[in-house]
Amino acid sequence: MELGSEFVWFVLIGLGAQLVDGALGMAYGLVSSSILLSLGIPPAQVSAGVHAAEVFTTGASGVSHLAMRNVEKKLFLWLAIPGMAGGIIGAYVLTQLPADIIRPFVYTYLLILAMLILLRSFGKARPRHEVKRVGILGFFAGLMDASGGGGWGPIATSTLLAKGGQARTTIGTVNAAEFLVTLAISVTFFLSMGLEHLEIVLGLLVGGVVAAPIAALLVKRLKERWVLFAVGCLLLSISIYQIGSAIFRQF
């Protein structure tokens, strides 16, 4: 395909992916990467391009959530700093390991979290305590985001929500922290392999920047129960699809 005639599609992909990610705290990379890979773009270029675009989209999303007062500062620091460390290590080391071995375990974990979040959305599950080791969570989420095993949003957002975090501040804080994590990962990718397909990056970031304030407003206005239900359904769909794909590849 000729990328010069497809810029508007990259903008639309970025717009849709950021609306989902900014409102639900996850899936920008999963949505945009899946579509780009289906267009025949090489995986390494997709990963580097999406992370480069995410530097701008997560920046816009973080500022939007700050403006809407959706960010909890202490949680932000506990997620962002370890997440950056995990992201750098993941970009350097874990990309050399077979991600197919890691993914089934990550998505089984996410499947369990999806069911807990759905139960919570119906008022059936009452979390007894909050996540105590947020720094470890941030490190692991950053590690998996860089290596392609799970992603920052699905791991960080879903774990915090399953443990009783308020939907508005959890999603806002995870999105804001993602800017620093993505910046660290993108710099690592750029130093190791450079940047190709600039048009993809520009298209994704234009769409994402436009969608960021709309998504931040949505998460502020929507009822927490609706947000939890949407997050649970999205996470359930992602985990079942990924587990099914991993099993199918074995045959």
Image (tube, rainbow, N blue to C red):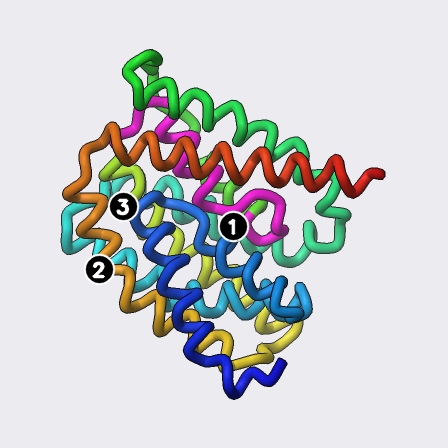
Asked if marks 1 and 2 touch (Cβ < 8 Å), the reply is no
* Residue at screen point 77% across, 47% down: 98
Q: Which image quadrant for residue 188?
A: bottom right
Q: Is residue 187 left or right of residue 217?
A: right
Mark sitting on residue 213 = 2
Q: Amino acid at mark 2?
A: Pro
Mark sitting on residue 172 = 3
Distance, label 1 to label 3, CA atoms, is 21 Å
* Magenta stretch, residue numbers: 145-166
* Element type at mark 1: helix
Asked if 190 appears above or below 19 in the picture, the reply is below
Viewer-nearest of discs 3 and 2: 2
Q: Is residue 202 left or right of residue 224?
A: right
Distance, label 1 to label 2, CA atoms, is 28 Å
First reached walking from the N terminus: tag 1 or tag 3: 1
**In the foreground, 85 or 44:** 44
Label 1, on which residue?
A: 85
